Image (cartoon, rainbow, N blue to C red):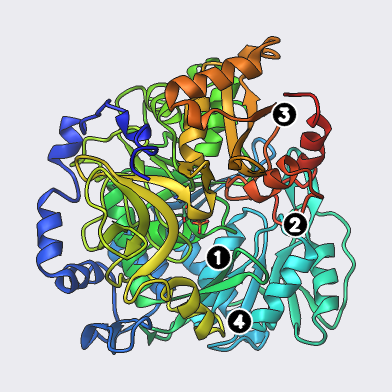
Amino acid sequence: MSETLSNLSREERRFEPPADLAANANLKEEAYDRAASDREAFWAEAAERLDWGQKWDQVLDWSNPPFAKWFVGGTINAAVNCVDRHVTAGNGDKVAIHWVGEPEDDTRDITYSQLKDEVSRAANALTELGVQKGDRVAIYMPMIPEVAIAMLACARLGAPHTVVFGGFSADALASRVVDCEAKVIITADGGYRRGAPSALKPAVDEAVEKTGDLVRNVLVVRRTGQDVDWNDSRDVWWHDVVDGASAEHEAQMHDSEHPLYVMYTSGTTGKPKGILHTTGGYLTGTSFTHWSVFDLKDDDVYWCTADVGWVTGHSYLVYGPLANGATQVMYEGTPEKGRWWQIVQDYKVSIFYTAPTAIRTFMKQGREIPDGYDMSSLRLLGSVGEPINPEAYVWYREVIGGERCPIVDTWWQTETGQIMISPLPGVTAGKPGSAMKALPGTAIDVVNDEAESVGNGNGGYLVIKEPWPAMLRTLWGDDQRFKDTYWSRWEGLYFAGDGAKLDEDGDIWLLGRVDDVMNVSGHRLSTTEIESALVSHPKVAEAAVVGAADDTTGQAVCAFVILRDSAGDGGEDIVEELRKHVQKEIGAIAKPRQIMVVPELPKTRSGKIMRRLLKDVAEHREVGDVTTLADSTVMDLIKGKEGSSS
Ligand code: 6R9
């Protein structure tokens, strides 16, 4: 793989950490050695940042791999750590959430004291509805404060929640409810989407219909005020049962390994996998990484743009930041021209965490839009979800970060629960496009088919060699699938499913999912690398590359590109121009056989391009299942373009 994957890491720009940030960084360089010399002691110290009922007897029990137990014998309550303890410490008046609704001027500021009252009321109301420790509760809501309140109320009671993204279908909701046997669904009448109310309750009604008599109650927040069908024996308004409930609620401590939540993520085929996270280790891993990777200080205003229906919304919008007592922005809408930067300006956001897909969308619209706002409050930028190509990184740094903010490109997964690979903002000289190093306390390697370390300068598969606190504990109800999916490829190694390369300095470059590695005439090519080459062309805003079956070469490179607004239609010879550009950047072997100029790319809610669907187009097949797309009409737009390109 090495000779064909060398292009990305030819990137030679380096960005040193700002001197004042480096001097005052929460985590300094010594942490790497300290963690390496005694990993368990390192994580025990991180766990000490939390409030425990009973302290643990043992940091890690790894006697029955791959089933880990962290902080064994300890008891803890996640909601108490995210809310009550900040009030007890005298920070009750600190804003926990600056909520910004989609309709302009629809905003709410919620302090930690208010959050404590709301979570307690919701916990009391859920208890009234018969929810007990261990019961599962499904949450299907828009990005409103009640979604965080609902999650924390469940955590308080020890009732594992499963949040289903509000854009998913009734079928997707039903299958998740059935898989984890949720007795209660918490939802809203609807939410706002691109300026208009969009209903949620009908999908819940349909889902409940499909699940027999499993669901006892549906708890409904009134958000949009739209008409909803009502089943008196089952449906309950949030304002009827929560608003009137007592704001006193005595929280019980739960075992460190008590299930906190199940998050479903799509597998390569078939039924989604229910990733199980438990309490003590998860909260330790997320709060510690949130504090160290984002260098969180008391007066920061943090904003993670992720939807709560995605793991990033769990770890870095709810549990991590709130456990750290941070002030954060929560926004109901999707990226729209200017609105995000208006929010940064209005709330003086200092730490901003988003996905490469959003950055490329803004690049496409042109820098004039962000240039119109005062974003001097920003001091640190983060990226997650996909490899960030060097062009997007440099644009993000220059245009959004005013060339002063370090960028942390954070690699992790629903399964890892916490960030695993990232620069440390006060330590690492960042390279555009590289997630850099395994965080202190984690053990990561890149190996070949025989599980041997590939060594610097080579590519292979990303693996995790030692257990970490926020790791998934199993797949809900399916220990065997857990073992088969992640632990069976090589003895004792966690297989992440991503390709990666170590450069000459030993820094890590993520190359996309290994199923995204193409084989063209016997050469292994990474989709990420070719996409990155395409996006480095001034006319290209975004690119997706797939390997399509080819009679002669095995697979052939097929590219789908979105042009920048400023590029117009790109001109007559745009396709040839881009093919040549890839040839110049990487080599003739990577030159796309076909390039289609398209208006949109099919993406999941978390911003990942669904290459499987593009492959269907490239191979002239019927397009497969589109139910997890954020916008299912996109494929029609793309297919409409078929035949109009070379
Ligand atoms: C947090 C999240 C996990 C997959 C992962 C990888 C990709 C995430 C990345 C990245 C390169 C980064 N990924 N962060 N690739 N650089 N900084 O995204 O979780 O939805 O489970 O996806 O996302 O391919 O394996 P999840």
587 displayed left or right of 21:
right
Residue 477 to residue 51: above or below: below
Residue type, mark 3 in image: Pro
Residue tagged 2: 627
Mark 3 / mark 4, whichever is N-terminal: 4
Q: Rounded to the nearest whole Å, what is the CA distance between mark 3 and mark 4?
A: 41 Å
Does any portion of residue 412 appear in the rendered image? yes
Q: Rounded to the nearest whole Å, what is the CA distance between mark 2 and mark 1?
A: 28 Å
Nearer to the camera, 320 or 528: 528
Q: Which numbered circle lies on residue 103?
A: none
Mark 4 / mark 1, whichever is N-terminal: 4
Assign a secondary structure to mark 3.
loop
Mark 4 / mark 2, whichever is N-terminal: 4
**For the residue with label 4, is its CB less than 8 Å from the closest atom of ligand 1?**
no
Q: Rounded to the nearest whole Å, what is the CA distance between mark 4 and mark 2?
A: 24 Å
Please tell me which residue is depicted at 49% across the width and 48% down the height of the picture. 385
Q: Which numbered circle lies on residue 599?
A: 3
Does any portion of residue 346 appear in the rendered image? no
Residue, far front: 552
Q: Rounded to the nearest whole Å, what is the CA distance between mark 4 and mark 1?
A: 16 Å
